[in-house]
């Protein structure tokens, strides 16, 4: 607490004590004890407010919990724990949007607050359900509703059903860029590149500065072994998003296929600068350096690619091991009894 605030607090306290109290308090203050003792007492009171707010929350007294947390926050407005308590109380009362704003305040105060991150995730899920229900009630046959169902089908890997819903969305809104790009990606996954290019081109016509359609067109032309056509679209993707490591990788690949190894090196180095774990970029870098006769650099790039491959293998092995362990049945009740004996 600043020295000025301490002095103000001392004089306010003296004013409440009367003449004799003022004399006594003045002596204590002169000894330097008041400045130390008074804030500690207040801090104890504030800690009690936080504790009582938490207790009220766990007893389902949500309004009281919010009131106590708000009182605490008057003197500690940037305390993330107090903000999380207030947000949880608001959330429990169904005040979802207020809770959302309070969680954001908590994360501004402490971006690494685990409780704020966890409960904000839960809140966002609840808000999403609430708003999608409103969307469906408001316009059950709208393009956005069909888009939502298509995205849900995609998550379930039912791509046939997803395509039907996306096409239904386009019937309602033929210029919906997100849906055009989604259909482009869907067709690209099915290796139907002509159809994918058509959808991506339609999206680009509606929104020329759209990254997804530019990158989608570039990657389709690369698959079709047409790097010269891919070049135009990949350059556009990078002009839209210069920090895109996938676009840098794809552009480097296009340059390499065109025999422009020096340009390929520049783009691939940019890609690994943005994403140092991009193994494919190192593989292409090794090939580009070989084309340029730079054997030492080629060996270094290949060694890095092999190092990343080994790390990927170890991660997969650990993941598989954790799955096996979690899938193993625990000891039966009989086995537990035998262990006791």
Image (cartoon, helix red, strand yellow):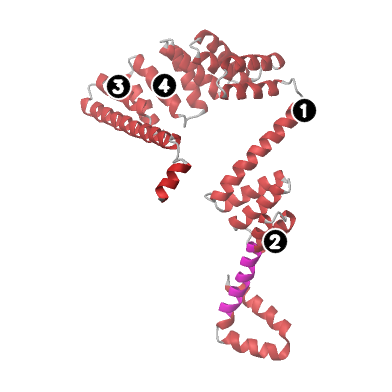
Against 271, is 78 above or below? Answer: below
Question: How much space separates mark 3 and mark 2, taking CA atoms?
Answer: 65 Å
Q: Which residues are magenta?
A: 35-51
N-terminal label among 3 and 2: 2
Residue for point 47% across, 20% down: 234
Residue to which mark 2 is pinned: 68
Rendered image quadrant of residue 325: top left
Tell which of 75 and 227 is nearer to you: 75
Mark 4 surroundings within 10 Å by alpha-carbon count, few (fewer than 14), some (14 through 19), many (20 or more): many
Nearer the camera: disc 2 or disc 4:
2
Visible residue check, residue 35: yes
Residue to which mark 4 is pinned: 251
Give yes or no for residue 309 being in the magenta stretch: no
Question: How much space separates mark 3 and mark 1, taking CA atoms?
Answer: 56 Å
Give yes or no for residue 36 being in the magenta stretch: yes
Mark 3 surroundings within 10 Å by alpha-carbon count, few (fewer than 14), some (14 through 19), many (20 or more): many
The prevailing secondary structure element of the residues shown in magenta is helix
Residues marked 1 and 4 touching at CB (< 8 Å): no
Residue to which mark 1 is pinned: 137
Mark 1 surroundings within 10 Å by alpha-carbon count, few (fewer than 14), some (14 through 19), many (20 or more): few
Tell which of 336 and 201 is nearer to you: 336
Position of residue 153 measured from the top left corner of the image (x, y, whole percent):
60, 21
What kind of element bears circle 4?
helix
Position of residue 282 measured from the top left corner of the image (x, y, whole percent):
32, 27
Rendered image quadrant of residue 307: top left
Q: Is residue 177 left or right of residue 241?
A: right
Residue to which mark 3 is pinned: 288
N-terminal label among 2 and 4: 2
Question: How much space separates mark 3 and mark 4, taking CA atoms?
Answer: 13 Å
What kind of element bears circle 3?
helix
Against 310, is 116 above or below? Answer: below
Question: How much space separates mark 2 and mark 4, taking CA atoms?
Answer: 57 Å
């Amino acid at each position: 607490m600043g020295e000025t605030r301490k002095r103000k607090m001392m004089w306010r306290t003296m004013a409440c004590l009367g003449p004799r109290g003022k004399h006594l308090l003045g002596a204590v203050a002169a000894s330097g004890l008041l400045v130390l003792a008074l804030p500690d007492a207040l801090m104890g009171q504030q800690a009690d407010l936080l504790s009582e707010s938490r207790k009220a929350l766990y007893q389902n007294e949500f309004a009281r919990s919010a009131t106590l947390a708000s009182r605490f926050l008057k003197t500690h407005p940037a305390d993330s724990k107090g903000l999380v308590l207030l947000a949880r109380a608001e959330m429990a009362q169904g005040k979802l949007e207020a809770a959302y704003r309070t969680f954001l305040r908590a994360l501004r105060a402490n971006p690494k607050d685990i409780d704020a991150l966890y409960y904000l995730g839960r809140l966002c899920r609840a808000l999403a359900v609430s708003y999608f229900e409103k969307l469906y009630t408001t316009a059950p046959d709208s393009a956005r509703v069909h888009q939502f169902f298509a995205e849900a089908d995609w998550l379930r890997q039912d791509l046939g059903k997803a395509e039907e819903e996306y096409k239904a969305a386009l019937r309602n809104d033929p210029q919906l860029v997100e849906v055009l790009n989604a259909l482009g990606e869907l067709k690209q996954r099915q290796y139907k590149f002509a159809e994918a290019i058509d959808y991506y081109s339609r999206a680009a016509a509606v929104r020329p500065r759209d990254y997804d359609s530019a990158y989608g067109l570039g990657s389709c032309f690369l698959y079709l072994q047409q790097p010269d056509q891919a070049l135009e679209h990949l350059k556009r993707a990078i002009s839209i998003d210069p920090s895109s490591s996938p676009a840098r990788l794809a552009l480097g690949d296009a340059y390499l296929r065109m025999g422009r190894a020096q340009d390929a090196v520049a783009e691939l180095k940019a890609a690994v600068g943005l994403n140092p774990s991009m193994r494919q970029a190192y593989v292409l870098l090794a090939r580009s350096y070989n084309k340029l006769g730079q054997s030492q650099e080629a060996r270094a790039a290949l060694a890095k690619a092999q190092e990343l491959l080994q790390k990927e293998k170890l991660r997969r092995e650990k993941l598989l091991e954790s799955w096996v362990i979690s899938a193993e049945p625990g000891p039966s009740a009989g086995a537990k009894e035998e262990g006791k004996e």
